[in-house]
Image (spheres, grey):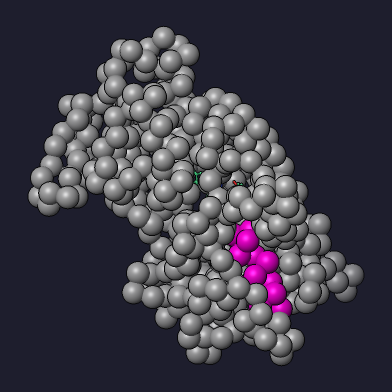
Amino acid sequence: MLAETKLLSLSKSKFLFNNIILLRNISISTANNAKDNYKLVVVGGGGAGLNISSRFVRKLGKTNVAIIEPSEWHLYQPGWTLAAGGVKNPDSFRRPQSKLIPSGVDWIKAKASVFEPESNSITLDNGEKVKYDYLVMATGIRIDFDGVKGLKEAMANDEQVVSMYSHETVKNVFPAIQRYKGGNAIFTFPKVPIKCPGAPQKVMYLAEDYFRKNGVRDKGDVYYCTTIPAIFGVKKYAEALMEVVKKREIKLNTLTHLIEIDYKNKQAVFEKLDKPGTTFRLDYSLLHVCPPMKPFDEIKNSPLVDETGYVDLDKYTLQHKKYPNVFGIGDCTNLPTSKTAAAIAAESSILATNLGNLIKGKNPSEAKYDGYTSCPLITGYGKTILAEFDYDGKPLETFPINQGKERRTMFHLKSDFMPILYWTAFVRGYWGGPGIYRKILNIFSFGKN
Ligand code: FAD
Ligand code: UQ1
């Protein structure tokens, strides 16, 4: 009898261990012990999902909120430009999800596979179902290393073909920059949408600065090959960046699309978007590729998206256009602004107000998102132009100075302050963007914005 009881409690604890690990009050569920209905389900545990679940567990209380997220690791992607430039160690930009999922939120460690918003239900990749009263989509965007012919093969066989766009590959970028001794150094920008559209040129400016500091800049050319018609989408910052490009003698190829890498001949193949069918080859001795990006298939195939495959939201309220109990945030959405963590911060406070209101039976359109986004455009070691703008491409600058200038303070804001802000406030739902500070600081700017 005693032995039986012992066996029972052993198998009970084994069951519990297998299914729920209580860690800092977080329950990590393998779905078969997940509750069958949550007040709020957040899909995706990136910056957007963590921020929103932190905010709502404080509003709704323990065990009412779940995050569906399959990955062990959370990646601070804004750090990758710094890692690529040799400024920081890439490992410092990755933390275990178990340390970040907010206390009181159930972590359903699985992938959401099928969405049935008519019945408020999600099927996971293990076949289990999770139901919700309210849903927030925060699944990000997929980096498509298969989107350029020969890219994976080239990265595997030629150490001078690199990409900062994953935790696994970012560590190869700075050594390739250090190995460069002359020839063409080419940096590419794919078809939009991509996250942080400034990032592909930030790594170029750091590399170019490194070449100058190490006496190899005059041994070759630096190319920026971009699919868009200008260096940047916002006039004020495009003008400032064109000054940098001219001063640094960077060769800018607009409407130029990387379609193939022929690593055996060390050549990149481009198509000219203004002359359909025209292609040309450029020799490279360093090639940094920003791969194309796409919505994840599970999202693209769901009823939640528009024809482009992104979650279909009202651009002001962040509420789904068809399903009122569904909201979205971050890179997975069709909000017509640049996909950045800065945008997510601003979106998070709008979403918190409107979804919070809906849950309380109040007006879900009270707060309106103006499209605020920001891109700290690193232009060299110790130099950054801090771009901030809205849906209309109108600058919305936080500081009462001209942010269109390269500044050392902004470089430190990006490299030293932002990671602290991200880990201590943003993922914990205490950072809703700089809007309030902009209003205060701009008292001193004499109507600059
Ligand atoms: P993600 O961080 O991609 O998270 C999405 C999560 O959803 C992932 O954890 C994923 O596993 C999960 N997921 C996906 N599919 C499913 C599914 N079916 N079920 C469950 N979970 C799923 N922003 C700035 O503000 N400033 C910068 O300086 C800056 N620099 C950048 C530099 C680089 C090189 C890059 C790549 C990005 C940069 N960004 C910057 C952009 C910023 O990193 C992103 O906009 C932001 O991280 C997106 O967060 P997210 O939560 O929307 O998506
Ligand atoms: C920001 O809020 C943010 O998210 C936390 C970033 O990503 C790390 C940014 O790069 C920037 C610039 C902002 C905006 C913040 C300020 C203070 C301008």
- Give the image location of residue 271, x and y in percent: 17, 45
**Count of marks overlaid on the render:** 0
Q: Residue furthest left?
A: 277
Q: In the image, residue 2 lies at what x, y percent? A: 89, 70
Q: Which quadrant holds residue 12?
A: bottom right
Residue 429 makes an appearance in the image = yes
In the rendered image, which quarter contains the N terminus? bottom right
Q: Residue 415: within the magenta?
A: no
Q: Residue at x 46, y 72 (%)?
A: 311
Prevailing secondary structure of the magenta residues: helix
Foreground residue among 396 and 303: 396
**As drawn, 441 above or below 371:** above
In the rendered image, residue 373, in percent from the top left (x then y), is placed at 55, 55
Residue 130 visible in the picture: no
**Viewer-proximal residue, 443 or 241?**
443
Residue sitting farthest toward the right: 2
Asked if residue 187 lies left or right of residue 264, the reply is right
Magenta residues, as a range?
Answer: 344-356
Give the vertical position of 39 relative to 180 (above or below). below
Q: In which quadrant of the rendered view does residue 400 lie?
A: top right
Residue 216, by quadrant, is top left
Q: Residue at x 39, y 24 (%)?
A: 247
Work out which residue is located at the far front of the displayed protein and give it.
446
Q: Is residue 392 left or right of residue 160?
A: right
Q: Name which residue lies at 65% across and 70% down.
A: 350
Residue shown at 12%/49% (left/top)?
275
Residue 70 drawn at (x, y percent): 56, 60
Q: Nearer the viewer, residue 239 or 228?
A: 239
